[in-house]
Structures are given as structure tokens and as C-alpha cells.
């Protein structure tokens, strides 16, 4: 019986979005059974938690959802950079 292992990496980064520093929480799932997926969560100005996923594609990490606040979509390159830094 062959055991397959996966990495589960969690980290937090402060990223400036919508004119202020926000705490983004990342959880990266690297498993042979699923594509590289990183879930990200952050709170909005009202304290509501926004959760979205980023998937690794040929061009790098991309936000998987379309209906998100603009200040999240505008930071896709920043998210990609911090994910790559942490998983190396």
C-alpha cells in the first residue's frame, strides 16, 4: 500500500488594499489528488469575512472567483508573489 503525503501550509501576510493594511490569511493545499489550491480569507470594512480561492495555473496563481470586491481583484499579483515566497 502506497501512502501519499501532502503539504498544508498556513501563513498570514499584511497587504495594503483599499488604502489600508489588511491581514490576509492563506492556506495552501498541495496534494497529489487535487490541483494546487490556496484558500485566502480577509475581513472587509464591516468585519465580514471574505473567503476565496486561488488556483495554480500555467501563468501563476489566479483568483478562482469573479464576484469579489475590486480591492481584492486588484491585488492578485501581490497574492501570487506571497504564495510563491512561502511555498519555496
Image: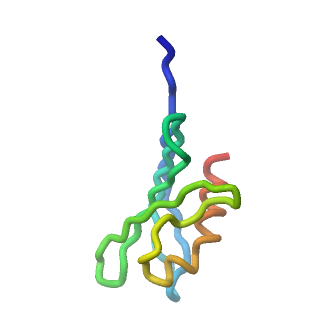
Q: Residue at x 61, y 51 (%)?
A: 86
Q: Residue at x 47, y 11 (%)?
A: 1
Looking at this view, name the residue that lies furthest to the top: 1
Looking at this view, name the residue that lies furthest to the right: 59
Report x, y in % for residue 69: 44, 82
Q: Residue at x 52, y 88 (%)?
A: 19
Q: How is the image coloured?
A: rainbow
Report x, y in % for residue 64: 50, 64
Q: Residue at x 51, y 15 (%)?
A: 2
Number of on-image labels: 0
Between 60 and 19, the residue placed more toward the observer is: 60
Looking at this view, name the residue that lies furthest to the bottom: 19
Q: Height in image: 40 above or below 74? A: above
Q: Height in image: 26 above or below 6? A: below
Report x, y in % for residue 77: 64, 70
Report x, y in % for residue 76: 59, 71
Amino acid at each position: 500500500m502506497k501512502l501519499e503525503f501532502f503539504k498544508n501550509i498556513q501563513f498570514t501576510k499584511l497587504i495594503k488594499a483599499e488604502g489600508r493594511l489588511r491581514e490576509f490569511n492563506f492556506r495552501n493545499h498541495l496534494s497529489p489528488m487535487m490541483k494546487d489550491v490556496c484558500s485566502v480569507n480577509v475581513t472587509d470594512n464591516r468585519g465580514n469575512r471574505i473567503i476565496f480561492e486561488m488556483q495554480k495555473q500555467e501563468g501563476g496563481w489566479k483568483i478562482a472567483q469573479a464576484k469579489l470586491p475590486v480591492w481584492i481583484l486588484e491585488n492578485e499579483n501581490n497574492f501570487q508573489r506571497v504564495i510563491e515566497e512561502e511555498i519555496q
